[in-house]
Amino acid sequence: MAMDPVCRMMVDEESMEWTVDHKGKVYHFCSRGCGEEFQENPEFFLAGGISRNSHCSCCGP
């Protein structure tokens, strides 16, 4: 299991299709939205920032 750095949801690296390679490390995401948000500001999320958007089922209303 890995933690989505945007919404902090635990995801299974084996089954998740949304990944981003950042500086040689692969990060796994619960959704395309979290992956895209990470790509816009990876250092924010790697420093512990949390998404305030509701673009995925785990983060949304």
Image (tube, grey):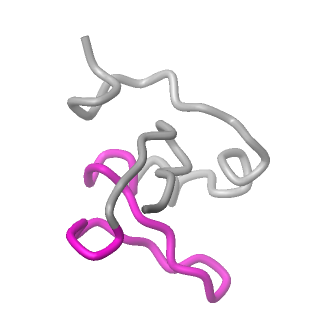
| Residue 41 lies in the magenta stretch | no
14 left or right of 8 in image: left
Q: Residue at x 51, y 40 (%)?
A: 8
Q: Residue at x 20, y 70 (%)?
A: 15
Q: Given the current orientation, which residue lies at the most extreme bottom position?
A: 24
Q: Residue 27: percent from the left, percent from the top?
A: 50, 69
In this rendering, the answer to whether 44 lies above or below 13 is above
The picture quadrant where one finds residue 58 is: top left
45 left or right of 9 in image: right
Q: Given the current orientation, which residue lies at the most extreme front position?
A: 1
Q: Residue at x 43, y 62 (%)?
A: 1
Q: Residue 9: percent from the left, percent from the top?
A: 42, 41
Q: Residue at x 39, y 54 (%)?
A: 36
Q: Given the current orientation, which residue lies at the most extreme top position?
A: 61
- Image quarter hosting the C terminus: top left
9 left or right of 16 in image: right
| Residue 16 lies in the magenta stretch | yes
The residue closer to the viewer here, 32 or 28, is 28
Q: Residue 16: percent from the left, percent from the top?
A: 24, 66
Q: Which residues are magenta?
A: 13-35
Q: Residue 54: percent from the left, percent from the top?
A: 33, 23
In this rendering, the answer to whether 55 lies above or below 16 is above
